[in-house]
Amino acid sequence: MGFIARVDAAQRANNSLLCVGWDPELEKFPAHLRDTPDALFAFFKAIVDATADLVCCYKPQIAHFAALGAEDALLRLIRYTQAAYPAIPVILDAKRGDIGSTAEKYATEAFGRYGADAVTLNPYLGHDSIAPFLKHADKGVILLCRTSNPGAKDLQDLDCGGKPLYQRVAETIARDWNGNRNCLLVVGATWPQQLAEVRAIVGDMPFLVPGVGAQGGNVQQIIQNGRGKATDALIISSSRAILYAGSGEDFADAARSAAITQRDEINRYR
Ligand SMILES: O=c1ccn([C@@H]2O[C@H](COP(=O)(O)O)[C@@H](O)[C@H]2O)c(=O)[nH]1
């Protein structure tokens, strides 16, 4: 089964569009874990065990692990999650993008080394930079379209023949890159108007929507403007607001409560 079908199945099984992101910030870890030898693995294993019945996927952010020299912990966490909860796909948030020969190596990193079920990519270098990922038809290829950060408008809104660049990106991917039906788009929760515009261009292509929780995206507007016709076609991702909902020994229970609250808020508007 391909990535998009697997996410759809997980969304139905858990009645949830919520994705929990893994963004380790050691200073926010509970004190009893912070200085232990395998703190990252212990923290995220507890988060996964506490939330696996509440989510449709997980999204580790690779820079957060690499900055700590913790690639090995990331690898073990992905393997643990896939073995313990095989119905829950893992998205590697890497935002890679490079010339074809290097892109081949990035594809091997994401799908070979880490065994991720999907990866986020920057489409700026064009089709040949994405082709090494697209050929893995069972994997998800999630392309930046309109990102959640304030600076998204600096380049992504530039006029490109009468339309903003992010709309041209959406058109190009839907028309030319989605032969294996394994493309998704990143559209930030903080831009509800743009969510509606991109949805009108790409039909039911799924969106990864980061920016709820810590970045303040409005859930009602995301659902109203971003939902597909035949399926929800939304993966709504939150990292810090779930991971660091508590800072004591009960941090995993606090994360579970925050995930339930976020899932239920999303479901209220579906
Ligand atoms: O447009 C984008 C693309 C990716 N991200 C990533 O999502 C999480 C958001 O974390 P929160 O704590 O929920 O704000 C983070 O890993 C970003 O790198 C994004 O925010 N916006």
Image (cartoon, helix red, strand yellow):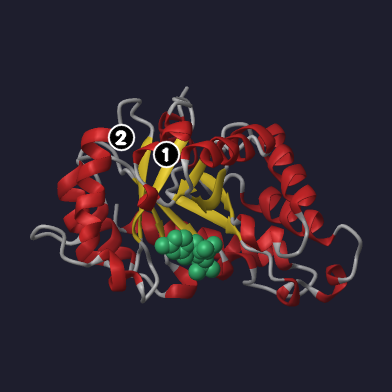
Q: Amino acid at mark 2?
A: Trp
Of residues 198 and 254, which is closer to you in this image?
198
Q: Residue at x 71, y 75 (%)?
A: 28
Q: On screen, 26 above or below 267?
A: below
Residue 262 visible, this angle: no
* Residue at the (38%, 58%) spot, across then down: 266
Q: Which residue is mark 1?
A: 130
- Asked if disc 1 and disc 2 are in contact, CB closer than 8 Å, the reply is yes
- Residue 122: x %, y % from top left: 42, 52
Is 10 situated left or right of 225 in this image? Answer: right
Q: CA distance from mark 1 to mark 2?
A: 9 Å
Q: Residues within 10 Å of mark 2 (few under 14, many from 20)?
A: some
* Residue depicted at 42% across the width and 31% down the height: 134
Amino acid type of the residue that numbered disc 1 sits on in the rendered structure: Ile
The percent position of residue 232, horizontal first and vertical second, equals 30, 44
Helix, strand, or loop for circle 1? helix
Q: In the visual, does 223 lie left or right of 210? A: left
